[in-house]
C-alpha cells in the first residue's frame, strides 16, 4: 500500500468537505423518501444484537470519558503524599517521548485511552458491519436502479475485510499518535494532540464507510485506499460526524451505520468513485 496520505489532493479538500456536508444534510430526507428503515426491525436477532452492542459501547465510552477527565484515587493519594500529580506525569511523558529511546508503554496506554482514541470506535464499526453493508447495498440499489442482494458468503467476506481495514488503521493511528506526540512535545503544544488525533481517527472511520462502497465494485483494499485518499475531505466529514454521534448514548451508535453508510454511498455515487481505476 502506498503512503498513508500520498494521494491526498489539498486543493480538493475544502470542496469535498462542502459537498459531503450537503449530502449529510439531505440524507434524512433521502431516507424518508425511500423508507430505508423498512426491513430492519423485521430481523429481530439483528436488531437486538445491534441494541446490545450500542448499550455496551455507550457504557464503555462514557467510562473512558469519565476516566479521561477525572483524577484517579491513586493519583489523588499520591498528590497528597507529595508525589507527582497527573499534570506532572503528563509532562514527564512528553519529555520521555523526546529524550527516551523507548516509549513508556503504560503511559502510552493510559494517555491514549480516551474519547480521542480510535480503538473503541473501530470495534463498533466491526461489530455493526452487517448493518453498514446492508444499507450500502440497499442505497446503491436505489441510486443505480439495480437489485443486488448479498448472501452469507458475501457478508463473511466484507466482515473479514473491515477487520483488516480497522487493524491497519489502528496500527497507523498508534504510529501517528507517537509521531504527533513527539512533534507537539518539541513545539510545546501537546494540548493539540487530542484534537489532531480526533481528526485523524475521523478520517479512518470515514475511510471504513467509503471502503464499503468501493467493495461493491471489487476494489482491493489497496485500490480503495488510493481512491479514498483523493477524497480525504469527504472521509473526514463522515468520520467526524460519526464520532460525534458516538457520544450520544445508545441512539448514536444505532444511527451511525444507518445514516453514515447511506451518506457515504450517496457521496461515492455522486463522485463516481467506482470509476477511479479508469481515470487514475
Image: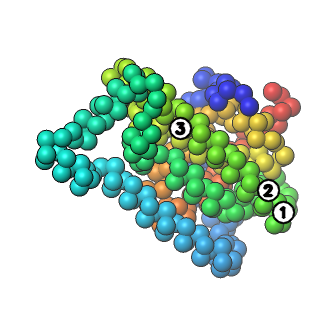
- The N terminus - image quarter: top right
In whole angstroms, how far apart are the C-alphas of marks 2 and 1?
A: 6 Å
**CB atoms of marks 2 and 1 within 8 Å:** yes
- The C terminus - image quarter: top right
Res 148 quadrant in image: bottom right
At 83% from the left and 46% from the top, the residue drawn is 217
- Nearer to us: label 1 or label 3: 3
Which element carries disc 3, helix, strand or loop?
helix
Nearer-the-camera pick, 278 or 150:
150
Height in image: 241 above or below 135? above
Mark 3, Cα crowd under 10 Å, few <14 / some 14-19 / many 20+, is some
In whole angstroms, how far apart are the C-alphas of marks 2 and 3?
A: 26 Å
At 70% from the left and 47% from the top, the residue drawn is 164
- Using the image, tell me which numbered label, if any, was put on residue 157: 2
Mark 1, Cα crowd under 10 Å, few <14 / some 14-19 / many 20+, is few
Height in image: 253 above or below 87? below
| x, y percent for residue 141 | 80, 58
Q: Which residue is mark 3?
A: 174
In whole angstroms, how far apart are the C-alphas of marks 1 and 3?
A: 32 Å
Q: Is residue 188 visible?
A: yes
- Using the image, tell me which numbered label, if any, was put on residue 153: 1
At 53% from the left and 42% from the top, the residue drawn is 202
Q: Earlier in the sequence, mark 1 or mark 3?
A: 1
Q: Is residue 251 visible?
A: no
Question: In this image, 156 relative to 235: left or right?
Answer: right
Amino acid at each position: 500500500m502506498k503512503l498513508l496520505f500520498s494521494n491526498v489532493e489539498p486543493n480538493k479538500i475544502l470542496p469535498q468537505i462542502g459537498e459531503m456536508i450537503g449530502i449529510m444534510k439531505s440524507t434524512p430526507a433521502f431516507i424518508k423518501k425511500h423508507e430505508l428503515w423498512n426491513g430492519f426491525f423485521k430481523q429481530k436477532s439483528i436488531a437486538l444484537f445491534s441494541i446490545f452492542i450500542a448499550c455496551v459501547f455507550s457504557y464503555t465510552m462514557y467510562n473512558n470519558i469519565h476516566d479521561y477527565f477525572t483524577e484517579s484515587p491513586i493519583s489523588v493519594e499520591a498528590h497528597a503524599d507529595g508525589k507527582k500529580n497527573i499534570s506532572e506525569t503528563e509532562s514527564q511523558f512528553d519529555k520521555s517521548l523526546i529524550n527516551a529511546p523507548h516509549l513508556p508503554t503504560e503511559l502510552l496506554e493510559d494517555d491514549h485511552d480516551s474519547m480521542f482514541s480510535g480503538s473503541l470506535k473501530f470495534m463498533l464499526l466491526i461489530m455493526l458491519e452487517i448493518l453498514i453493508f446492508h444499507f450500502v447495498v440497499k442505497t446503491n440499489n436505489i441510486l443505480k436502479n439495480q437489485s443486488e442482494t448479498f448472501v452469507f458468503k458475501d457478508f463473511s467476506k466484507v466482515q473479514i475485510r473491515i477487520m483488516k481495514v480497522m487493524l491497519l488503521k489502528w496500527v497507523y493511528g498508534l504510529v501517528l499518535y507517537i509521531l504527533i506526540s513527539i512533534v507537539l512535545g518539541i513545539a510545546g503544544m501537546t494540548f493539540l494532540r487530542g484534537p489532531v488525533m480526533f481528526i485523524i481517527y475521523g478520517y479512518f472511520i470515514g475511510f471504513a464507510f467509503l471502503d464499503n462502497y468501493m467493495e461493491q465494485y471489487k476494489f482491493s483494499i489497496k485500490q480503495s485506499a488510493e481512491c479514498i485518499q483523493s477524497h480525504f475531505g469527504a472521509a473526514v466529514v463522515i468520520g467526524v460526524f460519526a464520532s460525534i454521534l458516538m457520544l450520544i448514548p445508545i441512539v448514536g451508535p444505532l444511527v451511525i451505520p444507518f445514516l453514515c453508510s447511506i451518506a457515504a454511498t450517496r457521496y461515492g455515487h455522486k463522485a463516481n468513485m467506482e470509476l477511479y481505476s479508469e481515470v487514475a
